[in-house]
Image: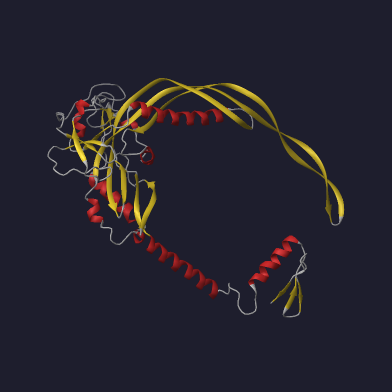
């Protein structure tokens, strides 16, 4: 029987390096295919003529709701998000959706992403099911441009809280020492509370909300960060040779997710902003304004496969190489490993004399320790075979 083992995201030891060239005017680094220098704004020479917009067919998955563009020459269609074959064709012009504004190109090659998968799946390999055929799984790795919503907005808050400041007083008390009553002093901390209210504002940006219903926000967060400084204006030639998904999460719904995250950050900022030593009953009322949004296509490698009755997915950030995924584990093998570990501990403990033998009584030892803790009296030995416990119950413990 196999279950899911969640894996923490990891980053490859060697991340891909972005190739740059010097600006002819100011010498600042400029990435290939950038039309303008980010430092001086001068127009850059284009080495090759840009590729025209590639022809694509658009499919909608009936299982997870993902909408993707594929090569028109492709004859077999599998959803890269859920591996479903239940897809239907649609025309994006009929949907009236917003066109993407920015894009980050793939920095990892498919071979590098596949190597990331092999390294990841090999971790804890003995605990994987023996019938999991890695070769058949590797063929399903796909590079997909996934839509993300990026919002920026101003948060203006009114807050109120109880502010606490510490002060100390000297307290006199009596205690017993060596059978005598003695008087001593100690410092006692007190807290003085007073109400406070005020205003706070901050401009937030940079939080990416997955525009794909096939890629939940929880999984998208595991692949972050993306280096947004590498954003480029969207051009159709970026999609040549890659799959591209149409956003299925509308802007209004993505905005609510983003505002919830920004409100959480605003509460944390206000809490750090408060004076005093401590606070309580913090209330923050926030209004958002000057909201702007961008639709961005981000590069992600996906590998979705089924094992048993479950679906597993492996994801790679196509820019940084960061990975996240779930893989099946074999519980029978885990049980065997635990049994071997427990047996080894028992053997070592018995060989080292750690386990009681002969007339030594482990429950008696535990009871003696308990009596010492609760009553504060020692156990008096009476002969070689009898010990009396002077606890309130007057119990006798026979060795």
Residue 330 in view, yes or no: yes
Q: Is residue 160 left or right of residue 92?
A: right
Does 109 appear above or below 26?
Answer: below
Would you identify the image quadrant in which residue 125 lies?
Answer: bottom left
Residue drawn at 83 percent across, 54 percent down: 177
Would you identify the image quadrant in which residue 68 lies?
Answer: top left
Q: Nearer the viewer, residue 64 or 258?
A: 64
Residue drawn at 65 percent across, 76 percent down: 360
Residue drawn at 65 percent across, 74 percent down: 361
Q: Nearer the viewer, residue 197 or 386?
A: 386
Q: Quadrant of the N terminus?
A: bottom left
The spot of residue 66 in percent (x, y) is: 27, 37
Residue drawn at 43 percent across, 28 percent down: 259
Residue 123 in view, yes or no: no
The spot of residue 104 in percent (x, y) is: 28, 33
Outermost residue, top side:
290
Does 132 appear above or below 28?
Answer: below
The spot of residue 26 in percent (x, y) is: 28, 24
Outermost residue, right side:
180
Q: Give the colouring mode of the picture.
A: secondary structure
Q: Nearer the viewer, residue 293 or 26?
A: 293
Q: Is residue 221 left or right of residue 378?
A: left
The spot of residue 390 in percent (x, y) is: 78, 68
Q: Nearer the viewer, residue 146 or 14?
A: 146
Q: Is residue 227 left or right of residue 138?
A: right
């Amino acid at each position: 029987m196999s279950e899911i083992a969640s894996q923490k995201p990891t980053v490859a030891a060697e991340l891909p390096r972005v190739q740059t060239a010097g600006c002819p005017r100011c010498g600042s680094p400029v990435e290939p295919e950038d039309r303008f220098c980010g430092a001086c704004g001068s127009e850059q020479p284009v080495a090759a003529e840009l590729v025209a917009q590639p022809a694509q067919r658009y499919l909608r998955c009936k299982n997870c709701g993902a909408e993707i563009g594929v090569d028109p020459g492709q004859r077999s269609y599998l959803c890269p998000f859920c591996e479903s074959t239940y897809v239907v064709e649609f025309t994006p012009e009929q949907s009236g959706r917003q066109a993407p504004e920015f894009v980050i190109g793939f920095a990892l090659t498919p071979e590098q992403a596949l190597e990331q998968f092999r390294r990841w799946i090999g971790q804890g390999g003995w605990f994987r099911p023996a019938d999991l055929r890695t070769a058949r799984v590797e063929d399903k790795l796909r590079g997909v441009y996934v839509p993300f919503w990026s919002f920026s907005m101003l948060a203006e808050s009114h807050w109120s809280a109880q502010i606490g400041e510490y002060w100390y007083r000297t307290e006199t008390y009596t205690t017993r020492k060596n059978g005598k009553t003695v008087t001593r002093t100690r410092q006692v901390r007190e807290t003085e509370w007073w109400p406070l209210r005020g205003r706070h504002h901050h401009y937030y940006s940079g939080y990416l909300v997955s525009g794909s219903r096939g890629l939940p926000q929880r999984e998208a967060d595991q692949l972050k960060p993306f280096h947004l400084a590498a954003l480029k204006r969207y051009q159709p030639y970026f999609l040549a040779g890659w799959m591209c998904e149409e956003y299925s999460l509308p802007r209004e719904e993505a905005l609510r997710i983003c505002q919830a995250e920004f409100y959480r950050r605003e509460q944390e900022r206000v809490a750090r902003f408060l004076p005093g030593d401590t606070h309580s009953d913090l209330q923050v009322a926030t209004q958002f304004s000057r909201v702007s949004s961008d639709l961005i296509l981000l590069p992600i490698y996906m590998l979705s496969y089924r094992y048993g009755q479950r679906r597993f997915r492996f994801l790679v950030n196509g820019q940084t190489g960061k990975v996240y995924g779930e893989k099946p584990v074999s519980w029978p093998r885990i049980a065997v490993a635990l049994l071997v570990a427990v047996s080894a501990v028992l053997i070592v403990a018995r060989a080292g004399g750690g386990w009681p033998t002969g007339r030594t009584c482990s429950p008696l030892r535990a009871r003696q320790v308990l009596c010492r803790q609760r009553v504060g009296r020692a156990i008096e030995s009476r002969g070689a075979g009898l010990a009396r416990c002077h606890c309130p119950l007057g119990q006798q413990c026979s060795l």
